[in-house]
Amino acid sequence: MRVLRDDGMAVSEPSETPNVRLAVLISGTGRTLANLIESIAAEALEAEVVAVVSSRAGVRGIEIAEVAGIPVSVVTRKPYSDDASFSDAIYAAITPYEPDLIICAGFLKRLVVPPEWEGRILNIHPCLIPESNAAGLGYYGDRVHQAVIDCGATTSGATVHVVDNEYDHGPVVMKETVPVLPGDTASDLAARVFALECELYPRAIAHYLTQHPDLIRRSGGGDWG
């Protein structure tokens, strides 16, 4: 929280309720991670990114995390025999940082959700769920937007949802729409949707926490371990 001192200078004052601790999962450029970091700095989201895990080495998102001083781990899928063991490695990488929520931010691998993480993982998908035909296995990046255009839809958008054990599934937290304009390419629509995502995702995270305050384990919702 920001307050004004007697001399008019804005300073930070500790909040009675600690910020939610986020672990962010990425697979590429880290644009969504960067947006979350910026939203937190602008106090649009009362949170702290305490850890980042990338499913790929050498991607831009790793550099974004390192510049921001956020601990980052690389956990690739190939060494693991199945999705469950890969997911266990992800959880092992973030557990020391005691996150309250996991935020998928362009994370392109399947995450198996164990009981202790049910309701604690959010994802954003760049179309409307369940209205769109562009969600599920194989739909990511421009493939999503091209599918929306190809089906003749006049509206697309973005959907924030709770992650469960199906691709692009789980309860919807919040979604917003954008128009699909005549002559749009997949890149045109992608740019419009991403601009929406930058505003929607932080707002949806904050909204989800107001609906589930027990998720912040340091504010009375339970302790780690």
Image (tube, rainbow, N blue to C red):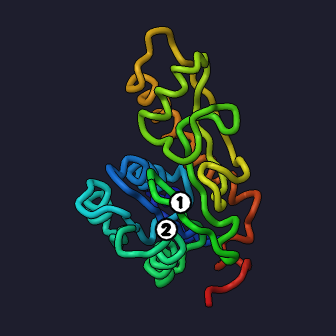
Residue flagged by tag 1: what amino acid is it?
A: Ile
Asked whether 198 or 79 is in front, the reply is 79
**Residue linked to disc 2:** 23
Which element carries disc 1, helix, strand or loop? strand
Residue found 76% across the figure and 57% down from its top = 211
Q: In the drawing, does residue 171 fall left or right of residue 43?
A: right
Asked whether 42 or 157 is in front, the reply is 157
Q: Position of residue 125 (x, y in %)?
A: 55, 43
**211 in relation to 96, above or below:** above
Image quadrant occupied by the N terminus: bottom right
- Quarter of the image for residue 153 reads top right
**Residue linked to disc 1:** 103
Residue closest to the far top: 182
Residue closest to the far left: 58
Residue flagged by tag 2: what amino acid is it?
A: Ala
Residue found 43% across the figure and 48% down from its top = 32
Asked whether 108 or 80 is in front, the reply is 80
